Amino acid sequence: MNTAIITNPVMWADVPDVDVIRVGPVFYMVSTSMHSMPGCPIMKSVNLNDWEIVNYVYDTFEDNEAHQLQDGKGIYGKGSWAAALRHKDGIFYVCFSSNDMDRLYIYRTEDIEHGIWERSVIPGLHHDPSLLLDDDSKNYVIYGNGSIRIKELTEDLTAVKPGGIDQLLLEGERTDIGLRIEGCHAYKLNGYYYLFFIEWPRIGNRRRRQLCYRSRELLGPYERKIILSDDLGYHNHGVAQGGIVDTLGGDWYTVLFQDHDAVGRIPCVFPMSWENDWPVVGENGRVPQVFATKLPAAEPKPLVISDEFDYVNNRLALNWQWNHNPDNGLWSVTERPGFLRLRTGQIADSILCARNTLTQRTEGPACSAETVLDLSGLRPGDRAGMVALQNGFGTVGIAAGEQGQFNVGMCVNGGDGGEETVESVEFTSDQVYLRIDFNFEDSLDQADFFYSEDGTAWKPIGRTLHMKYTLDHFMGYRIGLFNYATKQSGGYADFDYFHYHRQD
């Protein structure tokens, strides 16, 4: 049997706050998705290196003006944070906290790959929660930053247990730390409770690092140890925050992530061993970029895909996510077979307030996407095209004029969220080809924009976008297809395909 070689990062794309479990020979991962819908992607692997999306925990988790981009602000950088995944007695659990809703959400299903998830809601913010399903049938959520709390849940994990444990568990003890402990991942192993956290020193090398706390008693006292402070040679960006998982053969690994600037926060996998009941990551404090495993080799599945929009049912591939809650009455891949049709609804003055922007991740070290847009359904004031989406966005697309004329243009955030036109050119054809090239190599973080009348002769437009990862969105750049109205609703844009290429 061929065995897998793990190459870090295992996904050079924004898959942050990873939490991994194993059920039999299969590994499952959940990740943060914030304002992208559907949310909390479930990924599957047999070797920790090759992952595919198999499900989402929810299509949407709230239905209000902010989640629908109707309040002028949205839930950028909010939504679902730091989801935790656990499995016990045939039931899978996912929990996350939502900053905008001030709630803890716990979902459950018996079928992680195809099942529908049942939801429970617990009031109050529970920052970076981890579920601890103890071997005495008691269940807890451990959460917080700096001050870490523990709260006991009912046996079915649907509510806080009346009269159960609800107290401060421990404090981040260092005074020279800029960001004290957070990002909890909790386990009960070999008679110890293990809690994994990150911290961010403000002195010394100023690098995010991974910690482990352990105790033989649930409520402590806990011992503390730094188990990893390494950046894989990348701009002092520490690889940290995540958990641990074992294999059927008894080998152990840790799954963490690393900030990679504009492309986002990318997952990495490293070998782990045990020494005196402490986890040891890598060797001598260093972790490998590439290493062999005893896990089976597998056919890689793409995280970002090309799409001909040739669907029998009106359901998109799992690789796509909407920016905020979609209006499902205003999009279709069956109304005109072989095309994605985006109809306009609410009026917007910027791509940041436009509903039904359909997105996928970008990938490093470089990638490119192109589409072709039929202009016949656009109405005066409509804006349709392709976007490099973050707060510092860049768009390339068509603006429909009052007299039926079209202009192709490149726009950026003007500083207040509104669109500033960098360049606009009269366009007379009935369809336009659009392309964006991304370069994330060594955090160059540049995007360039092009258009064409025939898909062969490409013309650059606007300027190079210098992409920046900003915390108001807290998400790596995404590629999006959009259509929104600035004057009147009722128009539509037809996208014939989405072609994507990643440079290895």
Image (cartoon, grey):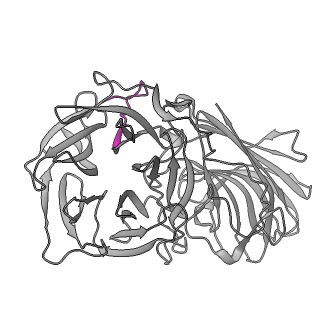
Q: Is residue 238 on the magenta stretch?
A: yes
Residues 502 and 54: in front is: 54
Image vertical order of residue 344 relative to residue 212, above or below: below
The span picked out in magenta is: 230-241
Number of marks in picture: 0
Which corner quadrant of the image does residue 136 belong to?
bottom left
Q: For residue 463, say whether it is visible.
A: no
Q: Position of residue 408 (x, y in %)?
A: 80, 53
Residue at the spot x=41%, y=26% of the render? Answer: 232
Q: Is residue 311 on the magenta stretch?
A: no
Residue at far top of view: 284
Q: For residue 73, say whether it is visible.
A: yes
Instruction: Characterize the magenta stretch by its predominant secondary structure.
Output: loop
Q: Quadrant of the C terminus?
A: top right
Residue at the spot x=50%, y=78% of the render? Answer: 63
Q: Position of residue 289 (x, y in %)?
A: 45, 26
Residues 419 and 10: in front is: 10
Q: Position of residue 496 (x, y in %)?
A: 82, 57
Image vertical order of residue 280 relative to residue 299, above or below: above
Residue at the spot x=74%, y=53% of the render? Answer: 307
In-image side of 218 versus 431 (left or right): left
Q: Quadrant of the N terminus?
A: top right
Residue at the spot x=28%, y=21% of the render? Answer: 284
Q: Position of residue 268 (x, y in %)?
A: 44, 37
Image vertical order of residue 450 relative to residue 275, above or below: below
